[in-house]
Amino acid sequence: MAVVSLEKISKRYTGASGHLAVDNVDLNIADGEFMVLLGPSGCGKSTTLRMIAGLESITSGVLSIDGRVMNNVAAKDRDIAMVFQSYALYPHMSVEENLGFGLRRRKIDNAEIKRRVKATAELLGLADLLQRKPHALSGGQRQRVALGRAMVREPTVFLFDEPLSNLDAALRVNTRNELIKQHHRLRSTMIYVTHDQVEAMTMGTRICVMNGGRVAQIGAPLDVYWNPADTFVARFLGSPPMNLFNTQIASAAGGHLAENAFLRAPLMRWQSGTLQGMAGKAAIFGVRAEDLHLESDAVPGQKHGSIKGRAFAVEPLGAETLLLVETEPGVECTARLSRHLKVRPGDEVELVFPTEAAFLFDSGSGRAVGSDRS
Amino acid sequence: MITTSLPRLFSRGTLAAIIGLYTFYTLAPFVWLATMSVRTTGEISLDHYAWPKPFHWGQFRSAWIDSDFATYFWNSTIVVTSAVVVVTLIGAAAAHCLARFRFAGNRLIYGILFSSIIFPPQITLISLYQILVDYNLYDNLFGLTLVYISLQLPLTVYLLEGFFARIPQDLFDAAKIDGYGDIEIFWRIVLPVGMPAIATTLILNFIQLWNEFLFAVVLITDPSKRTLPIGIRGFMGDHFQDIGLIATGVMISVIPVIVVYMFFSEKLIRGMTAGAIK
Amino acid sequence: MFVAPAILVYFGLTAYPAFRTIFDSFFTINGPGDTVFAGIQNYRDLWHDEIFWAAVRNTFIWSFIAPFLDVGTGLLLALALYAGVPFARFFRVAWFTPVLLSYVVVAILWMWIYNYDWGFVNIALRTLGLGSLAQSWLGNPNTALAALIVTHAWKWAGFNMVVCLAAIHSLPSEVLEASELDNCGWGAKLRYIIVPMLRPTLLNLYILAFIGKMKIFDLVWIMTQGGPLWSTETVSTYVYKRAFNWNTFDLGYPSAIAAVWFGVVCAAVLLLNRLLASRERLEF
């Protein structure tokens, strides 16, 4: 139960051209929150986590837990437990010894250790496995032991470093739910690193998207999904990724629109004042695949935008169909359509979308132009 | 990397002291030997630990020429080089066969060859002596070479088999489809691809045989046929007091090894410790 | 077919001689062509041979105890390097050097180091004021064996160190990090995590060292030749002496010794293997 705060945390690896792994990260994690650090490989999320744990030194910035500055406090004194990607179980110790090791090292009374180990083991379904060694356990069981080892210490903060990436799909779903359950039960502050957006969306109370060592956006999962701060976040969340096109802002009767050779989108979500300043300039237009429909399915009477092109691939996934459309040579658009789709590769199609489903980003910086009209 | 700070016992100072001491302990004898090898015995008797002044490089010449060191050196070179070449070839052939072809008794043969590593040399020493005498190969460099080949064979096969087994089968399948015969495959694929392991084995065998003593001392009696280790030992017997000369002679025998080591230290270390790590 | 030359060599020069030695042990051989069947007489004589037992005792002391010194030193050195000293690579290479020197070189060097008058050990003792401890290390039956063991360790410590170092480096770093979070300082980490996880390697090294010392000859022969008073006599040196140096030239007797010793070594290795069967790979 703790508040973790990172102020302008940076990590530069030593060396003449020291690699700047983490660049000025500002992050405040509230008590009991499940904060997910999300981003592609190499974005610095694991390094940030390890700095919180004390396994990496902090080059600059201040890390505090519950108001106490932790920069120079040794890892073992931070009252933090961590679940590693590879579980990091002690291979020469039994499950019971693995669970109890940290407690023994902290000179906790034996009876208390036994009690806690037993309780945790039962909670995680490990009671029958206590005498086994890690190499005799399955992946999922090892994962639970790693989790149990963290839980048994009743720490102030839990850290998770991509703990589910070594599990197969079904196990991943199960374990994910297990973790969510434990979070509700324990109400501890948990910081979770992953590159999987599904985990981020389902588990986090807030997510922090990182890219290239910097924070791209922090917010509740759905907020970040519907109001991405820049093109990176927009494309990172959502599967298939958001479609982005280079367009020009033009004025027309009744308002402004974004347009290019194949796309025409009325911009209803922005005040005309905002758009006035952008008239005649280039902008990046975004629309999500699930918001695109076939023209024939459009709701009549509603203003909508449209994209024209030629279908070049149809991917039936069972519950839905992905349609890949080539709008211009080299420019693709992906749409999530019904499973009863009758389009064939080579067909000319027109895709329409409601005007609320529009996103605008600055051409140069990629930052979103926030909507200011509801 | 360890991020926890070291406990006081292992503070920087103590650690440095320990390391310094041990390095001294390891290298000092050798440095001392080097210094003595360029001093005359007279100088050494006066002060055993002084720095050479002047450097008597001539010692090397006299050891080389006057004291038969040249002979010993060449004997060693001939015997060891031939033995190493032959054992590597035979060993590679055997290793290739054991690693690649499945046949009944494969593991058995491998096991037998490998287990002979633990044989104490005495078990074969006496009989080999008798055999060589019977075949008139006693006191003969050729006989010694043959024995050396047999000495290093188990180790060679062991090291190479492990490496060869890891060469992907696809290479061989492709070669067979391309029409290569077994021997060609051996020459053109196994040897080039296995070169790192073969090189390591070569170096290892070389060093072990260069330093080999027991069999040489038993199977060679003619002073003119002595190999270097025996020669040096003989020195100790004949010129016991002539420390300068002995030091020089020892240096001569050590230099080739050091040279090889300088260039191949990584390979050597890795090769010698292969299989010891579990 | 490839394997044929190897098998030939092996059988001709290793297996056959081995069998022949065992065969010979039942004879009294006084020279080529002069062989007299002696039954198990040689073995009986062996049983009563005090020198043989002294040699066995020495060799066993050497083989069972010295590996602790060898492997222990190696481990300590590896840990010292692992603690992260600058120039670790240099030290690694430097400390490995004695391994490559021939026993002859090592023997000669240490004979000089142990020299009573001007050897380094005694000079150091005298300068430190401990002159009373100075003695003829190789000439004193009580110290000779220990002196040899130290020399042998000097040569091989580097080998053990390198293996231990490689093993330590191959430990998964996440497990070590987990132990840091579990409140392990350097000492605790060593005791509870590093050394236990190194056990298979350490046991392996022990067995290798053990085998090596069961066979030892070169060093002993050059430095003390089994003296003084058989205090450093090993089975190998004894075999050599009986076969080639004794007044009575008889090859049957040393063959018996060799045969017995062969059996002992094999048995010991098998036993050790069985005992230390927990050498199975720690999966990680």
Image (cartoon, coloured by chain):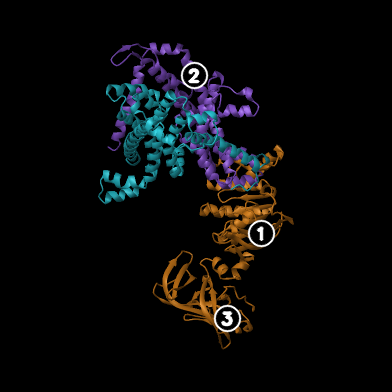
Chain of the residue under label 3:
A
Q: Say whether mark 1 and mark 2 are on the same chain.
A: no
Residue annotated with mark 1:
A60
Judged from this view, the residue extending furthest toward the right is: A67
Residue annotated with mark 3:
A267
Colour seen for chain A: orange
Shown in cyan, the chain is: B
Rounded to the nearest angstrom, the CA distance separating label 2 from label 3 is 102 Å
Q: Is residue B128 above or below residue C284?
A: above
Mark 1, secondary structure of its residue: strand
Residue annotated with mark 2:
C227
Rounded to the nearest angstrom, the CA distance separating label 2 from label 1 is 68 Å
Shown in purple, the chain is: C
B235 or C103, which is in the foreground?
B235
Chain of the residue under label 1:
A
Name the front one of labels 2 and 1. Answer: 2
In the rendering, at what x and y percent does residue A142 appear? Answer: 56, 46
Q: Is residue A23 visible?
A: yes
In the rendering, at what x and y percent does residue B182 appear? Answer: 27, 44
